[in-house]
Amino acid sequence: MTNGSQTLAADWARGCRALARADQVIGNLIARYPGERLEPHGDVFHTLVRAVVGQQISVMAAEQIWSRVLTLLGPVTPGCIAKADLEALRNCGLTVRKTAYLAGLANHVAAHPDSWGCVPDLDDVALERALTDLRGVGPWTAQMAMIFALGRLDVLPSADIGLQRVAAERYGIARSAASLTQLAEGWRPWRTIAIWYLWRDLDPVPVAY
């Protein structure tokens, strides 16, 4: 285990203890899934690509398209996307706009290797701003990268429809970004942990990007 993963494991445990004391719903979910936690993989580009693929479509449709993209590309790297035939990407089920977004992301990373390499070192506010400056990357897509690639522990993707739904069911609040945002104030500075367990309870396997 690396120092980074050791630090995350310790912070995750600390956050779980704090959330369990503060929120019975989250505490029950933490107890339901012992030993499970977020496992960030460190590849921001990979998560951005996967999140762009999944924008504004169902989880099932996103998984089907993602599987085809993986079959076509192999490794999800800027070089592989830059070399890919755009028509072949569209034939995976991507829209013309999403295909253009992926090509643009690949070209940006290839053209700015130094600044891209510094992205993981940015604080949360600067990181989200830097990612959303990229064409095709909105707040939700940037937040997926912050969570699943970099393991940032106080991120709230309030626009996520699944989170809005499960929060409404569990807490009896309105199904909206505003209601979720208000609820999540009580989870700071561990909002990622709280929403990860809500996501975990939605699906038979942990959500990943």
Image (cartoon, rainbow, N blue to C red):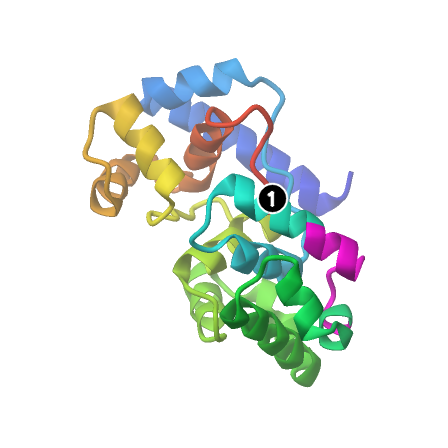
Q: Which residue is mark 1?
A: 63
Q: What predominant SS class does the magenta segment belong to?
A: helix
> Residue 117's quadrant in the figure?
bottom right
2 or 53, nearer to the observer? 53
Disc 1 crowd rating (10 Å Cα; few below 14, some 14-19, many 20+) is: some
- Rendered location of residue 59, percent (x, y): 51, 41
Q: Image quadrant of residue 94?
A: bottom right
**Residue at point 60% right, 28% down?**
205
Looking at the image, residue 55 lies above or below residue 207: below
Q: Residue 105 appears at what percent x and percent y? A: 60, 73
User: Is residue 75 in view?
Assistant: no
Which x, y percent locates residue 104? 59, 78
Viewport quadrant of the N terminus: top right
In the rendered view, would you say 66 is above or below 27?
below
Q: Does 189 appear in magenta?
A: no
Instruction: Using residue 142 as the reference point, say whether residue 38 is left or right of it.
Output: right
Q: Residue reaching furthest right?
A: 74
In depth, the one of 63 and 163 nearer the eye is 63
Number of labels in the image equals 1
Say if the magenta span includes residue 77.
yes
Where residue 102 appears, x then y in whole percent? 60, 70
**Quarter occupied by residue 162:** top left
Helix, strand or loop at label 1? It is: helix
Residue in the image at 64% along x and 51% along y: 66
Residue at (47%, 44%) from the top-left corner? 58
* 125 or 207, nearer to the observer: 207
Q: Which residues are magenta?
A: 68-79
Residue 116 seen in the current view: yes
Name the amino acid type tagged 1.
Answer: Glu
What's the residue at 42%, 39% (across, down)?
190
Left or right: where 158 falls relative to 14: left
Rendered view: 34 above or below 14: above
